[in-house]
């Protein structure tokens, strides 16, 4: 049985976290994934309290998203947070539009920057990688993709594959699962609503209630190195509905 995780960014509009942990634990989730806004401002005692709350609900924060500025400028503190919470993988999730390179060489250099930022975490025993959105799959002037250039520049980077963002980027997720199967160590499991539906939720859907071919993609992901399968919905209107329906879908695979 796969230990299903839940990206806490999905619950950012439904505080407090303690109630979310109770909900997730009751539904059978075993892991959660943190994001920079949760532990960014925390001191050591607050991180320990978060760990205790997770433990009380049978959850582990096995993976975490950390902003590039946190990774580069607060390296020691972020390492302490990851250790205290018991993570085994750390992922950088995003680069702001104004900071994105515009050509192949720039994206290759960005991959090298990630490689350097991740070294202290890899040296400390963590898996380290990049989490995609859609912009990495928009072709550059030379025809190459930022996604491929990032991993060219960062040969040690793992990939946390956000499948739905790959689809929204116009790419075939099965093609990229096959090409990067040895680098995928985590996957975001979320869905896309049919065109024109769920406008109030950004066009996203609960897992299994949208247009993504999850049975086929799930089978492909299970043949990769992925250890963490993270439910996400970028803007759910009902967190209980989202968490409940999504894990039920995954349990049916």
Image (cartoon, rainbow, N blue to C red):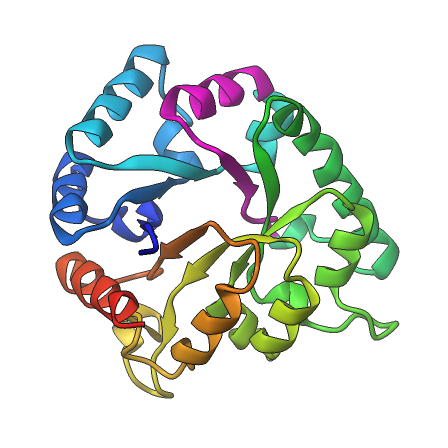
User: What residue is at 46 percent from the left and 25 percent from the top?
Assistant: 82
The answer to whether residue 135 shows anywhere in this view is yes
Q: Nearer the viewer, residue 47 or 253?
A: 253
All told, the count of numbered labels is 0
Q: Quadrant of residue 145?
A: bottom right
Please indicate whether residue 51 sits to the left or right of residue 39 in the image: left
Q: Residue furthest top?
A: 45
Q: Position of residue 218 (x, y in %)?
A: 44, 70
Q: Residue at x 69, y 31 (%)?
A: 117
Asked if residue 101 is positioned above or below residue 194 in the image, the reply reads: above
Q: Is residue 66 visible?
A: no
Residue 123 picture location, percent across and down: 66, 23
Quarter of the image containing the C terminus? bottom left
Q: Residue 210, image x and y in percent?
A: 33, 80
- Taking 241 as reference, is 97 above or below it? above
Q: Which residue is situated farthest in the bottom direction here?
A: 195
Residue 88 is covered by the magenta coloring: yes
* Horizontal arrangement in the rendering, residue 221 relative to residue 180 (left or right): left
Front residue of 180 and 191: 180
84 versus 24 height, above or below: above
Task: Give x and y (percent) for residue 154.
Answer: 77, 45
Vertical relation: 53 (above or below) 139: above
The answer to whether 30 appears left or right of 163 in the picture is: left
Which residue is outermost to the front?
1
Q: Which residues are magenta?
A: 75-96
Q: Is residue 166 magenta?
A: no
């Amino acid at each position: 049985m796969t230990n299903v995780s839940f990206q806490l960014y999905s619950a950012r509009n439904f505080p407090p976290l303690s109630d979310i942990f109770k909900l997730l634990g009751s539904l059978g989730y075993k892991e959660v994934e943190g994001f920079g806004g949760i532990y960014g401002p925390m001191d050591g005692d607050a991180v320990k309290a978060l760990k205790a709350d997770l433990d009380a609900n049978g959850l582990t924060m096995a993976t975490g998203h950390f902003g590039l500025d946190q990774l580069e400028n607060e390296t020691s503190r972020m390492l302490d947070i990851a250790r205290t919470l018991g993570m085994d993988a750390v992922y950088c999730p995003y680069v702001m539009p104004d900071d994105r390179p515009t050509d192949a060489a720039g994206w290759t250099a960005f991959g090298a920057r990630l490689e350097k930022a991740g070294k202290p975490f890899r040296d400390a025993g963590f898996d380290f990688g990049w989490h995609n959105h859609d912009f990495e799959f928009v072709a550059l002037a030379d025809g190459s993709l930022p996604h491929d250039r990032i991993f060219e520049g960062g040969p040690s980077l793992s990939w946390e594959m956000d499948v739905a963002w790959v689809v929204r980027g116009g790419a075939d997720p099965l093609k990229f699962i096959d090409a990067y199967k040895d680098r995928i160590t985590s996957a975001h499991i979320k869905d896309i609503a049919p065109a024109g539906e769920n406008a109030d939720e950004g066009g996203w859907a609960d897992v299994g209630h949208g247009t993504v071919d999850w049975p086929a993609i799930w089978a492909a992901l299970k043949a990769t190195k992925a250890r963490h399968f993270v439910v996400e919905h970028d803007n759910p209107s009902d967190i209980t509905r989202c968490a409940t329906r999504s894990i039920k879908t995954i349990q049916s695979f």
